[in-house]
Image (cartoon, coloured by chain):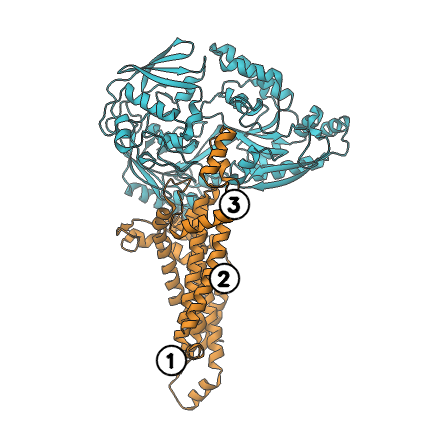
Amino acid sequence: MRKPMNWTRAIALGCTTAMAALASAGASAQTMRWSAPTDIATLDPYAQVESFTTSMLHHVFDPLVRRSRKMELEPALATSWKTVAPDTWRFELRKGVKFHNGNAFTADDVVASITRLLDPGARARGNLATVVSATKVDDFTVDIKTKGPYPLLLNDLAGIYIMDKEWMEQTGSIKPGNISTGVTTAASTTAMGTGAFSVESFKPDVGTNLVVNPNWWDKPEHNLKRIEFKPIKSDATRVAALLSGELDMIAPAPLQDLARIGAAPGFKVIEEPSLRLIFLGLNHRPELKATPGQKNPMLDLKVRQAMWHAIDLDTIQKRVMRGKSRNTGTLVAPPVPGFSAENDKLLAFDPELAKKLLAEAGYPNGFKTNLNCSNDRYINDEQICVAIAAMWSRVGIQADLKTESRATYFPRMDKGEFDVYIIGWATLPPMDGFSVLSALITEPKDNFGGSNPMGYVNPQIEKLTRDAAVELDEPKRRAMLAEAMKIAKDTVAYIPLHTQPVAWAARAGVDVPQFPDEYVRLWFAQVK
Amino acid sequence: MIRVILERLGQAVLVLLAVSAVSFAMFRFVGDPVATLSRENATVQEKAELRVALGLDRPILVQYGAFLSRTLRGEWGISYRNQQPVTKLLADRLPATLELVLVATLLSLFVGIPLGVVCALRPDGVAARLIQAISLIGISTPTFVTGIVLILVFAVSLGWLPSFGRGQTVDLGWWTTGLLTASGLKALVLPAITLALYQLTLIMRLVRSELIDVLSTDYIRFAKARGLPARYIHYRLALRNALMPVITVTGLQIGSLIAFAIVTETVFQWPGMGLLFIQAVSFADIPVMAAYLLFVGLIFVVINSVVDVLYAVVDPRLRVRAG
């Protein structure tokens, strides 16, 4: 409260501050109490593919390579690596590393962990799809073999945590669990890693407590003794718990409360644009679900361009996203390989041009389409769609908007039941533009096009994607990604909208770096 | 008497069968389980094998029979999300919900009945009018609004009570209780008030109207004419009769309180069955949803039956007619 403030506001907020000060003084100074709306799904890293659970487990486990403060890949449990053949990578492992139970970390642990992940029963199998096997060369050297040359192996390995082989054998968890099939092992509720923290307790919906690992191999950049994670589903309650001093940080903080939290003395809001890009998927098949039996108007490029020109992104950015999002013209966020400033240029908002394009395509009175949206997956997803439906109606496109929960929305999307639909993509875990190409814009066959249910196919993109998949020359590979992105933009494969913000809120004494991949990395946290 | 009980049991079984049919339908028709259970890039053959392994290729009635027998044996499957047997999950969460519901019920009875009596005995008094007006707010405010307002006042502004969670709990082996620790009791206050508010106002209004009715009946007038003391008339004769419907309503409301607890538990992150159910819905965790539905159905049926039997005990006329 250094700057002068008027009396009423001071009184109104005085209680809050006093309380927060009391609470923070009461709790031990190096405990980090924080909350998110969802809980971790399981402690078994290979049983799930949720990015939130993966980010939490990173405190307990280390991968072979990890992301630095600048999001660059750096050595973790592996100290160096080289390719000994186009399809074989050799990793030198760090010596003197101990698991939380005191067992030494060796090549056997890496081989056992990767073999466990490659098991067909592992839910996270797809996170290492191109790896064929891991073999021990000596106690601190491991060879990893891929299906042909694969440039993104390190990106993939940054999300693969190494477990203790002896512990897995003792507890009978050498086979992986899977949250989709309900397979559980001892590793579902207990964890044994080499990470900066170890698990003290894990109670679903109540909280997870971590304690610092005094024997961590790396020099800690944090000053924490404990991490107490408490999931709170209700937005209002989570904000209230922060303001009442029961928490040190909430992530994410609801957009509508950012102004209020920022104005409260003793609290701050931390914001950064995230990697998650929101865009509209379009039906590229012969008929629309909304008008069966008739030709799909969206097959005409002019119609797709008209739909894009009719969306007023600035208004969505200002009104719906409260100025916190970043509008975009391409399908990847700026920090991700494959981004180019040229592709990112926005298509102008121009309803007259949209009407003209529709008329040229033979739809002077517009046409009917379905518009399906989730209402609990992306920030303000439902409001975004409501706004777009209204904007389209001004140029004659009648969108029949239906919103639903993500539990039913995504299975329906995968089955291809929509005409126009909202979808977000963060290119995680590899953090590379290749993920957009291989999942969203390529034809669904041989492991490509897993999230392209509506039939977009472009022969040039098919070729570029397959070439980029085996290109080990990085600048050349990035140029291929950018070129494919340009074709996707020119042919309006999807309509990009914006990157959504990451907003956290914390007590003033908390210093936590924020990352665009929305991971909470508390091994960089300083708490006063 | 025995016939009443037998009839009740017959009805209870029918209701439970209906509920089980709905739960079963959820398993079958809320999306294809094979689609959610198989790997992302499973082949057609793998999916067919999984379908056989899950028994989904058999006729629907046979599957329903198998579902019933599993349910009767208490095998409710494994939660997709929490990775634990559903029976264990429900057993873990039951204490939290029951303690909350119990405290809320006691609160609504011990506050609601006296307030109702005050309103009935002096219907035109200032206190009665004030209570009536305030009760309107209680009955018309949605639970989540009440909860958030209580949190803002007592947790954020005053800082007296915690805004979420159950506080410290004591594990008795088969039951975890928050009633034995200071932080557990503190954590219980706001959720219990939130949950009790609706029922409290309901009971208060019920007691008031019933008591006013009873006080205007002939036997009360005769009792007054006989010169019996007012205290005896009001509390021994009138209130006892006026409480008959209150027993029914309270009993039935315990069922709805458990169901209503979903909202309260979500607002206060109270780790009970309601929160479990809400999480299950957002993750399409069908085993948990089905088990919760069956369990709540069972509670409703048991409570209704018990209330009916209690009724027969309290009201001699029902006993005579049935016997």
- Which SS class for mark 1? helix
Q: Earlier in the sequence, mark 1 or mark 2?
A: 2
Mark 3 near mark 2, Cβ–Cβ under 8 Å? no
Q: Earlier in the sequence, mark 3 or mark 2?
A: 3
Q: Is residue A382 above or below residue A329?
A: below
Which residue in the structure is indicated by mark 2? Answer: B139
Q: Earlier in the sequence, mark 3 or mark 1?
A: 3
In the image, what residue type sits under mark 1? Arg
Q: Chain of mark 1?
A: B
Q: Is residue B227 left or right of residue A219?
A: right
Which chain comes out orange in the rendered image?
Answer: B
In the image, what residue type sits under mark 2? Ile
Dot label at residue A474: none
Q: Is residue B228 left or right of residue A408?
A: left
- Which SS class for mark 2? helix
In the image, what residue type sits under mark 3? Pro
- Gap between marks 3 and 1, in whole Å? 61 Å
Residue A392: x %, y % from top left: 68, 35
Front position among marks 1 and 2: 1
Q: Chain of mark 2?
A: B
Dot label at residue B236: 1
Residue B320 is at least partly visible in this image: yes
Q: Could you say which is closer to the camera, residue A214 or residue A62?
A: A62
- Chain A colour is cyan
Residue B22: x %, y % from top left: 51, 52
Which residue in the structure is indicated by mark 3? Answer: B59
- Gap between marks 1 and 2, in whole Å? 29 Å
